[in-house]
Amino acid sequence: MAEQDKIRRIKDETKIIAVVGLSPNEDRPSWGVARFLQAQGYRVIPVNPGQAGKEILGETVYADLASIPDDIEVDMVDIFRKSDAVAGIVDDAMAHLPALRTIWTQLGVRDDEAAKKAEDAGLNVVQNRCPKIEFPQI
């Protein structure tokens, strides 16, 4: 499947996105992307251990993916962390998010081994791209 077709399907089928590394600082790229995704109708679940229990963009912040309640059916994880953190995040996502369909890593973030593991498990993977840039182009 062509990358644009995959991104179109992700855009159309995704409902709830966990943003790992979401900052409460409005000047940070993660905040701007999360706000854009909310404006497009997606529910954004913030994941940031330093902000756990607080709110960002009107949603409760969770320390990690395992802390997200089961009744919040996250189907996409958007990763705003360094590439060396991706493998652990992918493992946590696959272990704790039964509705998961997509792993997305932001610009400059890439882990081909973790991506292959997720793809082998049947997940969509998009690396080194930003939904705020990609979604409007489709």
Image (tube, helix red, strand yellow):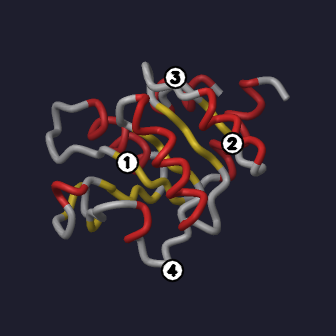
Q: Nearer the viewer, mark 1 or mark 2?
A: 2
Left or right, 72 with reference to 56:
right
The three-letter amino acid code for the residue at tag 1 is Val
The three-letter amino acid code for the residue at tag 3 is Asn
Labels 1 & 3 near each other (Cβ < 8 A):
no
**Spatial distance from mark 3 to mark 4, Cα to Cα?**
29 Å
- Which of the pair 25/35 is nearer the observer? 25
Which of the 4 quarters of the picture holds residue 57?
A: bottom left
- Residue at the outermost right position: 1
Q: Return the residue at label 4.
A: 71
Q: Secondary structure at mark 3?
A: loop
- Which of the pair 4/40 is nearer the observer? 4
Tell me the number on the disc at residue 128: 3
**Spatial distance from mark 1 to mark 2, Cα to Cα?**
19 Å
Residue at coordinates 44% horizontally, 22% vertically from top-left? Answer: 107
**Spatial distance from mark 3 to mark 2, Cα to Cα?**
17 Å
Which of the 4 quarters of the picture holds residue 100?
A: bottom right
Tell me the number on the disc at residue 20: 1
Say if 75 sits above or below 9 in the image.
Answer: below
Q: Secondary structure at mark 1?
A: strand
Residue at coordinates 71% horizontally, 47% vertically from top-left? Answer: 123
Sequence-first tag of 1 and 2: 1
Q: Residues within 10 Å of mark 3 (few under 14, many from 20)?
A: some
Say if 137 sits above or below 66 in the image.
Answer: above
